[in-house]
Amino acid sequence: MCVVAVYYASAQITEIPKKEIPADYGYIVKIGQQLPAFEMQLPDGTQIATSDFKGKVVMLQFTASWCPVCRKEMPHIEKEIWQKHKNNPDFVLYGIDLKEDAATTAKFRKDLKITYPLALDPLGKIFYTFAVQNAGVTRNIIIDKNGKIVYMTRLYKKEEFQEMKKVIELLLEHSVDSNKH
């Protein structure tokens, strides 16, 4: 694992793993790029915009009910990330359900006993802002509090998942430190 220093406005440095994203991951976006602006809706009708993420560490998890790898990964996200950080005001996590309606998304969330929010992407517009057409759906994107993409995954690989958790921890530690100054 390579480490890169990321500078924040406070001039403090947080070290996060630098990851080369393989071409076969199918991403359009790149590490270091600003998060593209988009809006999404939760099954209950609540509207969410990327502007709501300002100043927060964000995890976007792209998923679908028909995806077996998603179903394998999501309980780990629930237990190891969401349950640990859900009460942290500096952290936001949204699953984004690809090309499914509100009823299917709500049932999917209930069946897997997921408590983090799953947003709707019925036409795949959000997904295809990040990944090429026909790219696989199981993927996570971590965004720092400045709105920059800092980490991306594809499929569920334990080592990559553990590294992603560490990135989130480091970004949140920085958020706590910068709030003290």
Image (cartoon, grey):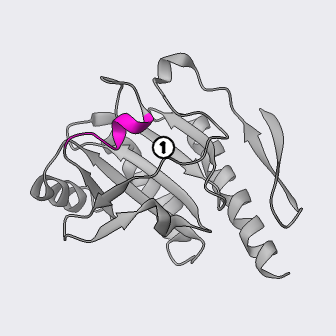
Q: Residue at x 52, y 45 (%)?
A: 141
Residue 91: x and y in percent read: 56, 68
Which residue in the structure is indicated by mark 1? 140
In the picture, measured across the screen, residue 80 lies left or right of residue 13, that is left
Q: Is residue 126 magenta?
A: yes
Q: In the displayed image of the protein, which residue is found farthest to the bottom?
A: 180
In the picture, measured across the screen, residue 25 lies left or right of residue 142, that is left
The image quarter containing residue 106 is: bottom left
Confirm whether residue 122 shows in the render.
yes
- Against 181, residue 84 (above or below) is above
Q: Quadrant of the N terminus?
A: top right
Q: In the displayed image of the protein, which residue is found farthest to the left?
A: 103
Residue 43: x and y in percent read: 19, 64
Residue 39: x and y in percent read: 35, 57
Residue 110: x and y in percent read: 21, 62
In the picture, measured across the screen, residue 6 lies left or right of residue 123, that is right
Please provide the residue range marked out in magenta.
123-130
Residue type at numbered disc 1: Asn
Confirm whether residue 116 shows in the render.
no
Q: Is residue 36 magenta?
A: no
Q: Residues within 10 Å of mark 1 (few under 14, many from 20)?
A: many
Q: Residue at x 36, y 66 (%)?
A: 48
Under circle 1, the secondary element is strand
The image quarter containing residue 11 is: bottom right
In the picture, measured across the screen, residue 8 lies left or right of residue 118, that is right
Q: Quadrant of the C terminus?
A: bottom right
The image quarter containing residue 71 is: top left
